[in-house]
Image (tube, coloured by chain):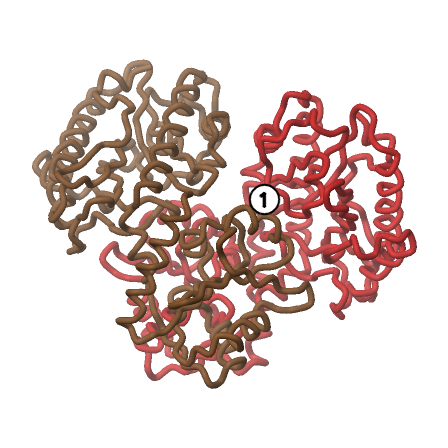
Chain colours: A red, B brown
C-alpha cells in the first residue's frame, strides 16, 4: 500500500482526535493498527498524535516492520519487557497528559494496568473512531477489494466445475477455499457456507457431512481475503436435477428485491431506505417474515464493518463505501434462497463489483 | 462431548467462584462459553452460578443449541433486542447482587453498559478463572487433541509426498491445510509456517512466494483443529538436496535439547525447570543466544494456553496438562531449526502424543 494513503489516514485520525480533547490515542485493535500503518503482524500497539507516531512491537517483527513500515518510528520491546512496560517507556518520552484509548477494544484489565503505569495521564475513552474512517474506502482499498472479488469469483468457477453428487458440504467448502488460494487469496474471507436443500434455511449454516446429492439445490456464501487482509463476500444458488417449482418463485422474488435495492444505492440515501426497498418487494410477495436479517453490511479489513444496511440505520451512504446487498428468504424445513453482491458507492450512483451471473437460468449446473 | 464432562467443568467453576465472593459469573469469552457448554457458535454469553446456568444467544442458533446443549436453559434474544438488554432480562429473574465478570475479556465499553443496566449489582472483576481450569484436560479433551494430532500427521504425510521444487512456501502451506481437512480437520490450528532456508530463521515466518528449490532445507510448523475446536501443534524440518554441514550440527543440538526436556516432564516439576533443561543443552553447544523464545506452551481450544514452559514460570506440571516442547536455534541470514512435539503430563510422567519421525536421517525426502 502506498505510504501516501497510510499517511492520509493517520492525518484524518489526528484531526478527529482534536475535536475530542485528546492529544493522542493508543490504538490497540490489530485491524486498526494495520489500517493506519500497513503492518500485517499482530501483538502491536500504535501511539499516534500530532507530531508523533510510534509502533510498539516485539523482536519477531523487526524485519517485517522494516519492510512494511519503513517511515514509522518503532519501539521494539525486549523479550523480558511486557507490553505495558513498553507503553510506559514510550509515554515517558512523549509527555502527553490527555490520551485517548479504544474503549470498545481495551479490556478492563488492560485499562487498569495502563492507568497504573502513568498515573499523571488522563485516559479518555474513545469508541469506534478508526472504524468510522474505515467506512469510506480510499482508492488503494477499493483496488484490494477488487482483487478479493476476483479471487473469490475465479475460485467459485473452479469449485462449480468440480462438484459431484458424492461431495459433502464440508468437502465442497474446503475445495472452494483451496481454489481461492490458488488465485492468490491468503485464505477464505470467512468459513464458506455450502448449504444443501433444507440447510439453506439457516442463514449461518455450518457445512456438514450432508451430500450434495441430497437436494436439487444448494446455497453457497463465500469470499476471499487478499494477502493484505481485504475481503469480498458473495452468495449464489446452484441448481441441479429437478428443483421444486417453488424454488424459482422464491428465487425470482429475492432477485427482484436485490436488483431493486442495488438500483437505490447512491450518495445521500440512508441505509435504512435501501433495506426498505428490498424488504418491500419481499413483503409484497408474501415472504416478509421469512427475510430475517438486515439487507447488508460494509466489507473491508473485517467481514462485517460499517455501514450496516439495516432497518434502523440512519447513516447516509457516501462515495467510497462498499456494502453487500444480500436479501434472503428462509423457509424452515424446506430451504432458503439468498443472492449477494458487493456494491461500491460512487460519486454519481453505484458500481456492482461482483459479476457472477445471477439470473435463474444461470444457477443451473 | 459427553454432558458429564461439561457438567463437571461447570461444577468446578462454581466452587472456585465462591472463594472469590461472587455468586455467579457472566462468561463473555467465546472459547470459555464453548468449554463450559459444548456450544460451538459465537455471539453468546453464559450466566453461571449455583443453581442456574443460562446461555444467552440469538435466533440464528436456536436449532444448534437444541442439538448441542439440550440440558441447558437458553435465553434467545429477539432480533430487535441488544445483548445488553438480554443480559438485563436474565439478571432481573435471577436476583444476584454479586456478579463476577471476565475482566481480561470484557471491554471498558461493555462494562459501562452492563453497569448501567443493573445498578444494584456489584460487578466483581475476575481474571483467567476458566483459563485456569482449561489448563488441565479431561479425558474427552485428551481424546479430541489425539484426533487433532492424527489429522495433522496424516495431512503432513500427504503434503510431504506432494512437494516439488517449483512449489512456493504459500502453495505448500495451502496444500498442507487442504490435506489436513481431507482427514476431518475443520481448518488448520493456525496459519501453517512453511519457511525455506534463511526464512526459517524467523520464528513466525509468514509463507511467501519463495520456491522450495531455493534451499536444500525448510521448516514446517503446523497443526490441525478438530470440528469441536481442539488443536495440535508440531514442527519438523524437511531436507532435500545437499544441505550445508552446519545443518546437521544445529539439528542434532536442537533434537538433543528437545529429547532432554521431554524426559524431564512429570507431575510436580516446574515449567521453568523444563525450559532450563533444553536451554542448558543449547547453551553448552554455543547457541544460547540463538534460542530466542520460550520452550513451549499449553494447547487446547486455543493454540496458546497455559501453562507456558518459560524461563520465569513457576507453575507446577500436573497430570492432564498438554504442552508443546519446541526448542529452536535461529541464525539470521542462514536459517533455523525447530523441532516440536505435543506432550501429555501423565500421573507417572509423560506421553508424547505426536509420532512423526524426528531423527536427522528421517528429515530427508
- In this rendering, the answer to whether B117 lies above or below B204 is below
Q: Secondary structure at mark 1?
A: loop
Where is residue B256? Give x, y as percent.
14, 30
Residue A14 seen by the camera: no
- Residue at image point 68% right, 27% down: A212
Q: Nearer the viewer, residue B141 or A39?
A: B141
Q: Nearer the viewer, residue B105 or B365?
A: B105
Q: Which residue is mark 1?
A: A190
Where is residue A354? Give x, y as percent.
76, 41
In the picture, which quadrant includes the N terminus of chain B? top left
In the picture, which quadrant includes the C terminus of chain B? top left
Residue A89 seen by the camera: yes
Where is residue A259? Give x, y as percent.
87, 48
Q: Is residue A142 left or right of residue A81?
A: right
- In this rendering, the answer to whether B81 lies above or below B217 is below
- Residue at image point 35% right, 49% down: A62
Q: Is residue B314 left or right of residue A291?
A: left
Amino acid at each position: 500500500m502506498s505510504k501516501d494513503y497510510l499517511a492520509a489516514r493517520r492525518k484524518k485520525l489526528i484531526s478527529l482526535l482534536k475535536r475530542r480533547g485528546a492529544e493522542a490515542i493508543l490504538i490497540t485493535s490489530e485491524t486498526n493498527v494495520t489500517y493506519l500503518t500497513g503492518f500485517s503482524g499482530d501483538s502491536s500497539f500504535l501511539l499516534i498524535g500530532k507530531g508523533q507516531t510510534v509502533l510498539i512491537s516485539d523482536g519477531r517483527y523487526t524485519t517485517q516492520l522494516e519492510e512494511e513500515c519503513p517511515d514509522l518510528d518503532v519501539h521494539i520491546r525486549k523479550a523480558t519487557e511486557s507490553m505495558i512496560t513498553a507503553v510506559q517507556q514510550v509515554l515517558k518520552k512523549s509527555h502527553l497528559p490527555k490520551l485517548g484509548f479504544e474503549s470498545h477494544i481495551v479490556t478492563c484489565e488492560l485499562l487498569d494496568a495502563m492507568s497504573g503505569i502513568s498515573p499523571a495521564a488522563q485516559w479518555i475513552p474513545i469508541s469506534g473512531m478508526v472504524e468510522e474512517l474505515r467506512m469510506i474506502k480510499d482508492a488503494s482499498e477499493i483496488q484490494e477489494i477488487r482483487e478479493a472479488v476476483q479471487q473469490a469469483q475465479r475460485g467459485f468457477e473452479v469449485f462449480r466445475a468440480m462438484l459431484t453428487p458424492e461431495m459433502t458440504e464440508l468437502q465442497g467448502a474446503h475445495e472452494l477455499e483451496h481454489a481461492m488460494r490458488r488465485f492468490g487469496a491468503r485464505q477464505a474471507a470467512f468459513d464458506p457456507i455450502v448449504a444443501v436443500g433444507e440447510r439453506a434455511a439457516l442463514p449461518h449454516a455450518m457445512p456438514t457431512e450432508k451430500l450434495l446429492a441430497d437436494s436439487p439445490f444448494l446455497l453457497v456464501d463465500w469470499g476471499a481475503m487478499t494477502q493484505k487482509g481485504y475481503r469480498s463476500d458473495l452468495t449464489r444458488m446452484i441448481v441441479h436435477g429437478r428443483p421444486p417449482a417453488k424454488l424459482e418463485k422464491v428465487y425470482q422474488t429475492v432477485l427482484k428485491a436485490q436488483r431493486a435495492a442495488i438500483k437505490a444505492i447512491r450518495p445521500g440515501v440512508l441505509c435504512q431506505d435501501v433495506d426498505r426497498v428490498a424488504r418491500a418487494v419481499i413483503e409484497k410477495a408474501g415472504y416478509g417474515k421469512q427475510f430475517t436479517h438486515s439487507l447488508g453490511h460494509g466489507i473491508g479489513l473485517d467481514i462485517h464493518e460499517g455501514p450496516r444496511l439495516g432497518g434502523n440505520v440512519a447513516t447516509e451512504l457516501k462515495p467510497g463505501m462498499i456494502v453487500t446487498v444480500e436479501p434472503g428468504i428462509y423457509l424452515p424445513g424446506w430451504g432458503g434462497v439468498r443472492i449477494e453482491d458487493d456494491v461500491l458507492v460512487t460519486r454519481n450512483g453505484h458500481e456492482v463489483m461482483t459479476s457472477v451471473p445471477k439470473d435463474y437460468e444461470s444457477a443451473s449446473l
